[in-house]
Image (tube, rainbow, N blue to C red):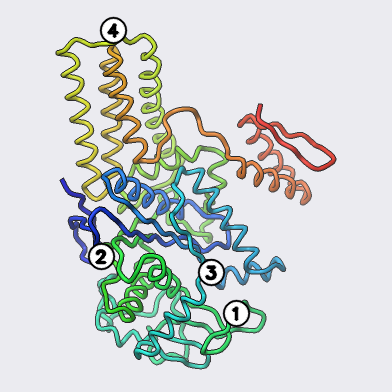
Amino acid sequence: MSIQLYNTLTRKKEEFVPLEPGKVKMYVCGPTVYNYIHIGNARPAIVFDTVRRYLQYRGYQVTYVQNLTDVDDKLIRVANEEGVTVQEVADRYARAFNEDLKSLNILPPDIQPRVMQTIPDIIQFIKGLVEKGYAYESGGDVYFHTGRFAEYGKLSHQPLDDLQAGARIEVSDKKENPLDFALWKAAKPGEIAWESPWGEGRPGWHIECSAMVLKFLGPSIDIHAGGSDLIFPHHENEIAQSECLTGQTFARYWLHNAMININNEKMSKSLGNFLLLRDILERCSGQLIRFFVLSGHYRSPINFSDEMLEQAEAGLERIKTAYANLQHRMATARPEEAAAVAEEQAAVITRLRAAFIREMDDDINTANGITVLYELAKEANLYMRNANVGAEQLRAYTGLFEEIAWVLGLVLGEEEELLDDQIEALIAERTEARKQRNFKRADEIRDLLAKQGIILEDTPQGIRWRRK
């Protein structure tokens, strides 16, 4: 059996064959750290963590890089509004992002580069494009010549002549072509900036990922992934600038997840349905959110609603209950099972493991993978109806539960607790809410902590907390 991945570049499923046998270079676009992430940001984080886990499960050594954008117009605006530096804003929300990843049981990336740490590499990358004639300086800005890359539009499958200036493409009389995009932006008064051959300025949005991929993974990688909203212009522009500089295929497989709708409507601030992950985590666990997200195929839109969340909760509880029952029966299991029964149960385990691999090999179909988990729960429950059960068979069922759960990032044992840094963040938020006389929010946080068994104590040095 081989893994088949749907490649946005070719618009078809392809057998996954990495550049180097047994090893995978994978890059996933992370968020711009100017605010807490929303539920839409959580989907690619969960999906591609699961892709990474499955590749590891299938024996690959994965190098997983996920960037953080810490230089951006939004960051500059927030910093100016708060009267702090861009780096202070970025550090705050980068920490919050990583805390949120922990709550979703997402493995930390092997490398998590940030723009501010990669400025010399970005400048060097742009210099190379200028020297090769693929970029030009104009009034302190540097732009990429889209017309000089014959394959521009190959990822979004749009001919160059048909492409229209879209999201994040600024119209400017400095450009030779409306579709040319900024690699370097000249500094504006009061903005964060760095010295460069073109004067003081900062990177454009798209260049950071190309420079980071080249620095940490090399000129060609196996998998580049992100939300479908990044296909154009972000990923399209990454391909153009990277392949023009190196002359090599930038990424072999492009994976993109579909969006999350809220109560059957597109999530947007204007509709008032913009849901921060942290707010959702106050009323349900990270495990439930993860299970809900993986209950749909990653390339299909999913609808987030209380009803769908309740259905997911019931499903997750069903799986956890079967796993708990297996552990409970272990105490009274007999050492050996009758040969015929042992053979029959071993065949069930073998069949279900093969079914899970078959479904996941088919473009990481977690929805069908969870269906296999339901069937595993059903078979385990049927076996445990017997008055006498064998310890070896119980261990086999338990082992397969744990195998599949690890791939899906699910914790089937004890209920997860709030992490220490999450508790500290909530206490800080409660303290600030009280200062602002927002007692409703302060009470909500107090009640949440109480449900988690967290006791707050006032001391001369401030609030101290402990678990019951």
Question: What is the distance, in whole Å, between disc 3 and disc 1 at their CAs?
Answer: 13 Å
Mark 3 vs mark 2: give the one in front. Answer: 3
User: Label 3: which residue?
Assistant: 117
Quadrant of residue 465 within the rendered picture: top right
Mark 2: few/some/many CA within 10 Å (<14, 14-19, 20+)? some
Q: Which mark is residue 252?
A: 2
Point out the image quarter for the N terminus.
top left
Q: Is residue 145 above or below residue 103?
A: below
Residue at (62% x, 58% y) in the render: 92
Q: Earlier in the sequence, mark 4 or mark 1?
A: 1
Q: Position of residue 405 (x, y in %)?
A: 36, 35
Question: What is the distance, in whole Å, between disc 3 and disc 4 at their CAs?
Answer: 61 Å
Residue at (58% x, 54% y) in the render: 95
Give 444 or 142, whichever is nearer the viewer: 142
The type of residue carrying mark 4 is Asn
Give yes or no for contact between labels 4 and 1 (Cβ–Cβ under 8 Å).
no
* Residue 277 left/right relative to 144: right
Q: Earlier in the sequence, mark 3 or mark 2?
A: 3
Q: Which mark is residue 193?
A: 1
Question: What is the distance, in whole Å, between disc 4 and disc 1 at their CAs?
Answer: 72 Å
